Image (cartoon, rainbow, N blue to C red):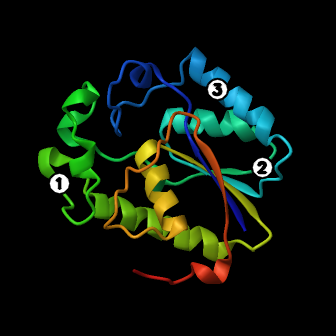
Amino acid sequence: MKIYLVRHGETDANKNNILQGQKENLQLNEHGVREVTKLKQKLQSVPFTICYTSPLVRAWSTAIILVGDRTITHEDKRLIERYLGQFEGVDRHGYSAKKYWDYTLNSGDADVEKIQDIFARCDSFLQEVIAKHEDTDTILIVAHGAVVRALHHLLKKTVRKKNLLGFSIPNCFCKEYQIQKEDFIHERR
């Protein structure tokens, strides 16, 4: 089975270093639409079986630009961006990513969604999706930075006590993962 993880294209909040979280339900800006259109050209020959997307506008718009009507697109609330509590809609400079991505610390200070909760909902999503699809399927998942990062670590079976921020997930990030169904179904850490 192939899984493509994509982060939505740029919004004005991304451009201005504003944390969006779940409350900032913004549309892609012009640059974001261009980014996604360019990615669409690269993925045009990929025969997606299905597309799953966050219900937030920036991810949904990205998914529709990428696949249009060539495949069925499903919203899944488990793919919504991390709830950032008091940091939603404010400049990102006050937010300590290192603290909130420490799996062992699992901080929920300032009402930020705990990292272990994000991993739990992403794991639930992956288990369900992988169970219902065949090894020959190609699945597109369009979501947000935190969710894409958690899904990446789940698919790569990363040791969660390591640095979970060790790679960049810019807007319009796209990565392909080749997995075997039996390697993931009902596997728990």
Which amino acid, by three-letter code, is at mark 2? Thr
Q: Which quadrant holds residue 126?
A: bottom right
Residue count near mark 3 (Cα–Cα under 10 Å), binned few <14, some 14–19, many ≥20: some
Which of 4/113 is in front? 4
Q: Is residue 51 visible?
A: yes
- The residue lying at 44 percent from left, 19 percent from top is 12
Label 1, label 3: how far apart the Cα atoms are: 33 Å
Q: Nearer the viewer, mark 2 or mark 3?
A: 3
Look at the image and tell me in which quarter the N terminus lies: bottom right
Label 2, label 3: how far apart the Cα atoms are: 21 Å
Residue 141, horizontal then vertical, whole percent: 61, 52
Question: As drawn, is 74 to the left or to the right of 138?
Answer: left
From the image, tell me which residue sits under label 1: 108
Asked whether the beta carbons under mark 1 and mark 2 sit within 8 Å of each other, the answer is no
Question: Of label 1 and label 3, which has the lower sequence position?
Answer: 3
From the image, tell me which residue sits under label 3: 35
Residue 123, horizontal then vertical, whole percent: 46, 68
Residue count near mark 1 (Cα–Cα under 10 Å), binned few <14, some 14–19, many ≥20: some
Q: Is residue 145 above or below residue 103?
A: above
From the image, tell me which residue sits under label 2: 71
- The residue lying at 35 percent from left, 24 percent from top is 17
- The residue lying at 42 percent from left, 25 percent from top is 14
Question: As drawn, is 61 to the left or to the right of 94?
Answer: right
Which amino acid, by three-letter code, is at mark 1? Gly
Q: Is residue 77 visible?
A: no
